[in-house]
Image (spheres, helix red, strand yellow):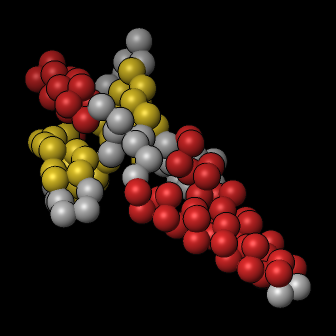
Amino acid sequence: MNRTFHARITWNQVVVMIVAAVLAIWAFWIKQALLAVVFLLMLIVLIERIIHTTYTVTTDGMLVLYYGRFTKGREIKLSDIRKAERFKGWLTHGVDIFYGANDHVAVQPVNEIEFLNFIQNSIIKK
């Protein structure tokens, strides 16, 4: 059975959405419809990405990172994962996944500890 984890909405994503919305309203206010449409399209892509970002561990041993319809996702074999650990920065926190020779990806699931435990248990089972 596949296990899906949803991404956390971060403060910087909210700020970018607010800025895009304000710029779209401003562009309508100054009667620049084309510029307003550009900002509205950017807002649609941002909202779509925030809502649909998921991290799925499949039964066939893959970690599928899906970032929405407009962005290319990524598939990582669980057997290729070398290490997964939490990180906490000044402005953000999440889980770093190191795989392959020198590749890594940072993800921000809603429940980081549960995601990390599930990934580590999946790595051990390989």
Q: Nearer the viewer, residue 23 or 6?
A: 23
Residue visible at 83% across and 81% down? 29
Q: Is residue 10 above or below residue 125?
A: below
Give left or right: position of 9 versus 123: right
Q: Position of residue 68 (x, y in %)?
A: 57, 46
Q: Quadrant of residue 95?
A: top left
| The C terminus, quarter of image | top left
Give left or right: position of 59 versus 82: right
Q: Position of residue 74 (x, y in %)?
A: 43, 47
Q: Nearer the viewer, residue 76 or 105?
A: 105
Q: Position of residue 93 (x, y in %)?
A: 23, 51
Q: Position of residue 45 (x, y in %)?
A: 64, 58
Residue visible at 47% across and 59% down? 13
Q: Is residue 8 above or below residue 60?
A: below
Res. 39 in view: yes
Residue visible at 67% across and 67% down? 21
Q: Is residue 23 above or below residue 75?
A: below
Q: Quadrant of residue 44?
A: bottom right
Q: Nearer the viewer, residue 97 or 41?
A: 41
Give left or right: position of 40 versus 11: right
Q: Nearer the viewer, residue 103 or 28?
A: 28
| The N terminus, quarter of image | top left
